[in-house]
Image (cartoon, rainbow, N blue to C red):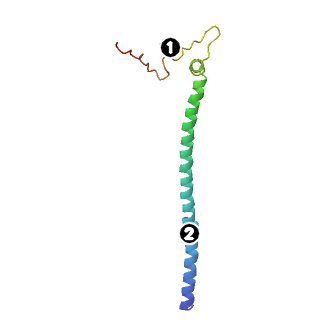
Amino acid sequence: MTKKARKRLTIAAAVVVATIVYFGFVFPTGEFLAEGRQLRNAQNELLTLQRTNKRLQATVNQYENPQYLDKLAREDFGLVKPGEFSYQIMPGSPLYVPPNGKVNSPPQLPNS
């Protein structure tokens, strides 16, 4: 075998070995790292969804509580139970307390 043929054979063998190394180790490693990133993203999304689910379940539990529903119906919708009466004190009345809870003191009359 001549030196030139041996050199070509060595280069061809190196290319074959490099190709085998790439497809045997480098390519799967890249895929493995990409799958690791996908797994971490999926775990983060799962954690977020679990937190949201827990918060929504707490809301569902709240709406299943009869005392909470009674309070909500009375305060937000002004509903009353049968046999009860609802009274509203209109603005301008001395008994009126605004929704913010700050009672305005009556205006003072000037001294004559």
Residue farthest left in this picture? 111
Residue farthest right in this picture? 82
* Residue type (three-letter) at the residue carrying disc 2: Tyr
Residue beneath disc 2: 22
Residue 93's tag is: 1
* Residue type (three-letter) at the residue carrying disc 1: Ser
CA gap between label 1 and label 2 equals 87 Å
Which numbered mark, 1 or 2, is in the foreground of this view? 1
Task: Assign a secondary structure to mark 1.
Answer: loop
| Quadrant placement of the N terminus | bottom right
Task: Report if the CB atoms under discs 1 and 2 are less than 8 Å apart.
Answer: no
Query: Which residue: 49% across, 20% down?
Result: 98
Residue farthest bottom in this picture? 2
Residue farthest front in this picture? 112
Q: For label 2, count other residues whose C-alpha is less than 10 Å away and answer few (under 14), some (14-19) or many (20+).
A: few
Nearer-the-camera pick, 46 or 67: 67
Task: Assign a secondary structure to mark 2.
Answer: helix
Mark 1 or mark 2: name the one nearer the start of the chain: 2
Nearer-the-camera pick, 68 or 101: 101
Nearer-the-camera pick, 66 or 2: 66
